[in-house]
Amino acid sequence: MTITEVVAKVNGRIAVDKPGAEVNFAYASDLLSDVMGHCGDESALITIQNHLNTIAVCTLAGIEIIIICHDRPVPDDMAEAARREEVAIVTTPMSQFEASVALSALPPSAK
């Protein structure tokens, strides 16, 4: 699923673009240690964690797109790190549950 398709499914907007970003899996969690242990490459992370550490975890786990729920703002330092590490950020007004349902065509991510 391309970033454009993800945006459409979650009624979102691109906060940090990564042209050509595609995901084949999805994972929903707000516990970053859980994400590191269970989320694999080519995944979209559905979360409310809108801080710099989220980018570091995504870089380690091979996550292509972060979907930040409840229209939480993306801090400047997070956006800058996402650009540097080539991780796309999409924001959505949806809850984690709603976003997960909207992306249910993607299989769950697993390592």
Image (cartoon, grey):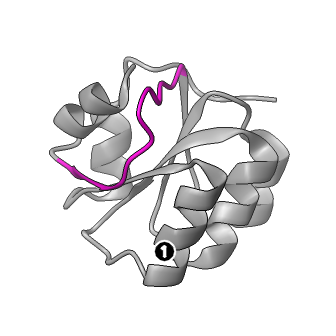
* Magenta-tinted stretch: 12-24
In the rendered image, residue 53, in percent from the top left (x then y), is placed at 69, 73
Disc 1: CA contacts within 10 A as few (<14), some (14-19) or many (>=20): many
Is residue 64 in the magenta section? no
**Please, is residue 24 above or below residue 56 in the view?**
above
| One can see residue 30 in this view | no
Is the N terminus in the top left, top right, bottom left or bottom right quadrant? top left
Compare residues 98 and 6 and report the one nearer the observer: 6
Give the quadrant of the C terminus: top right
- Is residue 17 shown to the viewer in this render? yes
Where residue 106 appears, x then y in whole percent?
Answer: 45, 20
Please tell me which residue is depicted at 77% across the width and 44% down the height of the picture.
Answer: 61
Q: Let me know if residue 15 is in the magenta part.
A: yes
Name the foreground residue: 28 vs 92.
92
Residue at image coords 37%, 23%:
2
Which amino acid is tagged 1? Answer: Asn
Residue 46, image x and y in percent? 47, 50
Q: Residue at x 51, y 25 (%)?
A: 23
**Residue plotted at (60% across, 68% down):** 81
Whether 88 is drawn above or below 55: the answer is above
- According to the picture, the residue beneath numbered tag 1 turns out to be 50
For residue 92, side relative to residue 18 (left or right): left
Q: Quadrant of residue 101?
A: top left
The relative height of residue 108 versus residue 100 in the rendered view (above or below) is: above
Q: Is residue 93 above or below residue 23?
A: below
* Secondary structure type for disc 1: loop
Q: Main secondary structure of the magenta part?
A: loop
Direction from residue 79 to residue 37 in the image, left or right: right
